[in-house]
Image (cartoon, rainbow, N blue to C red):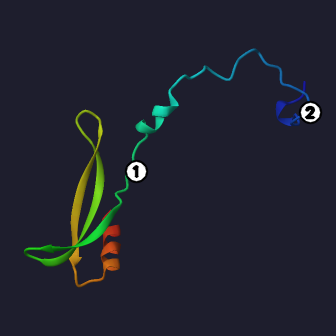
Amino acid sequence: MTDPASTLIGSGQLRESDGATLGQRVDFNIRGLGRRLPKAEAPEGWVKKIERSREGRVWVGFFHLWTTDALGRRVRTKKEKTLGPASMPKHDCAAEAGRLH
């Protein structure tokens, strides 16, 4: 018998099979599959200029953080971080927010 790796595709030669199948059939509902997929771990957010009582106008970065509660469910919480005074340009604050990860 020839080596199965050297058999050409479409040559008509089939490997001898011992009757084994490719595996057991797995039965699951594909419609509900996406609900159990994990969420992205990297926090993505936005930057906003806000008036604060003590600091005056400042840039504040907001993002969502995914955590796991006591029951094992994924919970989204909103976080914020003061990035700097509003006198600096927005793109500098956004770069600062990128370094916070």
Q: Earlier in the sequence, mark 1 or mark 2?
A: 2
| Residue carrying label 1 | 40
Outermost residue toward the front in this view: 31
Residue that appears at 29% across and 59% down: 63
Residue that appears at 33% across and 62% down: 45
Residue 38 drawn at (x, y percent)? 41, 43
Q: Which mark is residue 2?
A: none
Outermost residue toward the top in this view: 19
Where is residue 37, by image quadrant?
Answer: top left
| Residue carrying label 2 | 11
Please count the marks in the image.
Answer: 2
Q: Is 10 left or right of 95, judged from the image as shown?
A: right
Question: How many neighbours does mark 1 have within 10 angstroms: few (below 14), some (14-19), or many (20 or more)?
Answer: few
The relative height of residue 12 versus residue 65 in the rendered view (above or below) is: above
Where is residue 101, by image quadrant?
Answer: bottom left
Where is residue 80, by image quadrant?
Answer: bottom left
- Do tag 1 and tag 2 residues touch (Cβ < 8 Å)? no
Outermost residue toward the bottom in this view: 87
The relative height of residue 25 versus residue 52 in the rendered view (above or below) is: above
Q: For the residue marked with disc 2, what is the amino acid?
A: Ser
Q: For the residue marked with disc 1, what is the amino acid?
A: Ala
- Judging depth in this view, the residue of 77 and 16 nearest the camera is 77
Distance, label 1 to label 2, CA atoms, is: 47 Å
Residue that appears at 40% across and 50% down: 40
Outermost residue toward the left in this view: 54
Q: Secondary structure at mark 1?
A: loop
Residue 97 drawn at (x, y percent)? 31, 69
Q: Secondary structure at mark 2?
A: loop
